[in-house]
Amino acid sequence: MEEIDFESDPFDDIVAKDPRYDARAYALLMDVIHYLGEGGKHMSSADIMEEFKERALDQYGPLTYTVLTEWGLKRTEDLGEMMFNLVEGRRVRKDENDTPESFSGGYDFNEVFKGPYAI
């Protein structure tokens, strides 16, 4: 498989097939995958969801919920959809146990991304 520079990847082919999610959401998710996958270890959906949450909050703070929903993400199931779009786009590999459903019900976006900043 050809090495892809995810930091400058515009994800045009993936967004053209599934325009629900912004290319910037894929870039953030790829950053998470790259970080968690260092050393070739397999990462679970729980690992991905947790690291995605931490990085999004760290980067966008009180605007996280607004940014993510603008990018098309409203629930953890969207992360699963994006992961499998990345698999189809040959950006990441999956093993036989990986399913989009493994991202189901991870956490509530409203609670996690708005809650810490509620007045």
Image: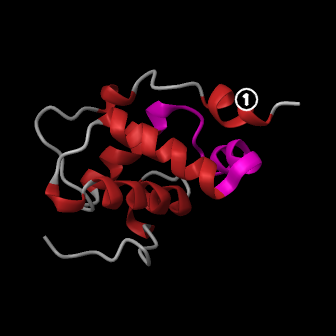
Q: Is residue 27 magenta?
A: no
Residue 8 figure quarter: bottom left
Quick check: 42 left or right of 84? left
The residue singled out by tag 1 in the image is 115
Q: From the viewer's side, name the closer residue of 63 and 76.
A: 63
Residue 57, how many percent across, how many down? 62, 47
Residue 111 figure quarter: top right
**Furthest-right residue in this view:** 119
Where, quadrant-wise, is the C terminus in this rendering?
Answer: top right
Give the magenta-colored segment's residue range: 60-78
**Amino acid type of the residue tagged 1 in the rendering:** Gly
Residue 41, how many percent across, how many down? 17, 51
Residue at x-position 46% and y-position 73%: 10
Q: Is residue 6 visible?
A: yes
Residue 59, how many percent across, how many down? 62, 58
Residue 20 against residue 91 in the figure, above or below: above
Q: From the viewer's side, name the closer residue of 91 and 15.
A: 91
Residue at x-position 53% and y-position 42%: 53
Residue at x-position 18% and y-position 46%: 42
Quick check: 88 left or right of 48? left
Quick check: 82 left or right of 116? left
Residue at x-position 54% and y-position 31%: 75
Residue 52 against residue 24 in the figure, above or below: above
Q: Is residue 20 visible?
A: no
Q: Is residue 70 magenta?
A: yes
Colour mapping: secondary structure
Q: Which element carries disc 1, helix, strand or loop?
A: helix
Quick check: 51 left or right of 102? right
Count every numbered label the image shows and give the total.
1
